[in-house]
Amino acid sequence: MMRDVYIIGVGQSTFGKLSDRTAADLGLEAVSEAIKDAGIRPQDIRVAYGARQFDAATTAQSILKGVGVAAIEMVNVENACAGGATAVRGLWKDIAFGLYDMGVAVGVESMTTSSIAGKLIPPQKDDLDGHLGLTFPTYFALIARRLMETHGAAAEDFALVSVKNHHHGCLNPRAQYRKEFTVEQVLASFMVADPITLLECCPNTDGAAAVIMCSKDVAMRYTTKPVKIAASVLLSGDYFFKKADLTSITLGKNATRMAYEMAGIGPEDLDLIELHDAFACEEIIHYEDMGICKPGEGIKLLRSGATALGGKIPVNPSGGLLSLGHPLAASGVRVIGELALHLRNQAGKRQVPNAKVGMAQMLGGMDNGLEAGAAGIHILTI
Amino acid sequence: MEKILIKDGILVEGPDGVTLAANRCKSCGRVYFPKSKFCLDCHGDELADLPLSKRGRLFSYTMPGMPSSHFKPPYAVGFVEIPEGLRIFGPLDIIADQPFKIGMQMEVHEDILWTEGEKEYIGFRFRPI
């Protein structure tokens, strides 16, 4: 029988260009904070999941030895941008199915010390599209162009997403960039791939995030207000040829639908969303795929202010990848921790008032012939 | 110069010159470029060769300001919709008096995409017509 799983501790490292620190050191900062936040002893952790994409090697072990935890089951995963969500999902399964009562999931990335630092990621030998010039920014530029063609989007709309998320980031002491921008400034930044400008792309960042999870009876020993994981979903991408248009990401849409079903809620029940805004234009697509507006009305929703702090359904109140930066495997854990802070009413100046239900989404990965790599969705309630 | 095709079997000599080499599932009709060994949709294992139409319509495009693995700005890339029901990604020729517009007719042609030392890498580009 499946048990409910709860989050009792969250932690995040400093995010930034931190080439003087190792991945293990960043992970240690996040895990130590999560342990302290939960009020547990490190030795209460009986299982650990580590996520990392670049130059990964026994990630969880290298971090946890720093808090005096060794010789327990540790699993290390890689799933592109969804790596962190994959670690949480793995831990969720272990606790839900009764294998363990308490564990930690940690995602970490040290982009600036990785083997790809300062380089373009070279395409695999058999990656035809990659050799023909397909990169993440060009792909999202082609998507943005379709939004302009079929959804009435203007270049200013993509800039507006960046303005909104940077404004949120100014309220978050953990954001890498805490700076307000105007639509004009975003549009005037370097044209990475028209219509996408530099300030509409997330920066490369080093950082880590961790969550302590446990069963209900264990959670009640530490807190009277544990955050429940009402849905945990991990899904991989289908073939690209099945895709109808570029303005919907079928993988994200399907994974979200599964999560709503599992949690027994609908998009109208959400109080906040943290999602993958590696490129500003994609946030608009996710609005529609998540059903927080009707298909084709993402631009209208954005312009209405509903997805900004103070609006009906704030999206990326943390500041998103656009202002926090994107340490790939850390982001999937970080967004889950962010929801927990809001549900506990501890999110400081960026707090979404009376937040009871939140959804964290992280998706990514590009593999020639597939729509995307993986999507992880978690719905949290209190 | 040694000529190297960037991926085996992607080009074929059709009735109107060189074009993209696809294949089609005999069971469900799904068309694949590059060719597939079996049908990824219905899992049928009989596929027939199908040279694609040389012409299609521009579906989306961009002119990146940053380099990709083999191209430096200025260059253009995009998706072209082919009548056989495929959306194909590739480099686009930039022609001064023919700005890109979604829906415009494009034609595929064989070209040297990049060189490395004494090696010429051969692939395809789409050109506005």
Image (cartoon, coloured by chain):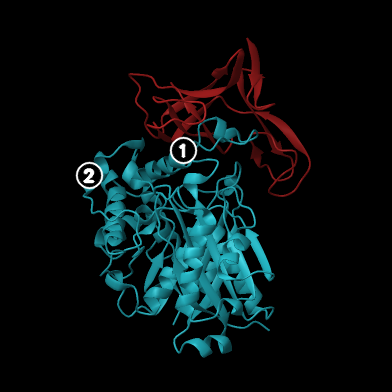
Chain colours: A cyan, B red
Point 29% across, 69% down: residue: A350
Q: Is residue A176 visible?
A: yes
Provide residue A100's location: percent of width, then percent of height: 66, 79
Disc 1 or disc 2, which is closer to the eye?
A: 1
Question: x, y percentage for residue B41?
Answer: 68, 49
The residue that mark 1 highlights is A118
Q: Are marks 1 and 2 on the same chain?
A: yes
Q: Earlier in the sequence, mark 1 or mark 2?
A: 1
Q: Is residue A22 left or right of residue A295?
A: right
Helix, strand or loop at mark 1 = loop
Q: Residues within 10 Å of mark 2 (few under 14, many from 20)?
A: few
A146 or A45: which is nearer to us? A45
Closest to the observer, A371 or A319 = A319
* Badge 2: chain ID: A
Residue B109 placement: quadrant? top right
Q: Is residue A63 above or below residue B81?
A: below
Q: Does residue A250 appear in the picture of this structure?
A: no
Residue ID for mark 2 = A185
Q: Is residue A170 above or below residue A356?
A: above
Residue at image point 60% right, 78% down = A43
Image quadrant in which you'd find residue A89: bottom right
Give the amino acid at mark 2: Gln
Query: Looking at the rendering, in which quadrant would you find the N terminus of chain A?
Result: bottom right
Q: What quarter of the picture does the C terminus of chain A occupy?
A: bottom left
Residue B121 in picture, x, y percent from top left:
60, 20
Element type where label 2 sits in the image: helix
* Near-viewer residue (A18 or A353): A18
Chain at tag 1: A
Please give left or right for residue A317 compared with residue B71 in the image: left
Query: Badge 1: how crowded within 10 Å, few (<14), some, or many (20+)?
Result: few
Residue type at mark 1: give it: Gly
**Which percent across, then down, holds residue A115?**
55, 41
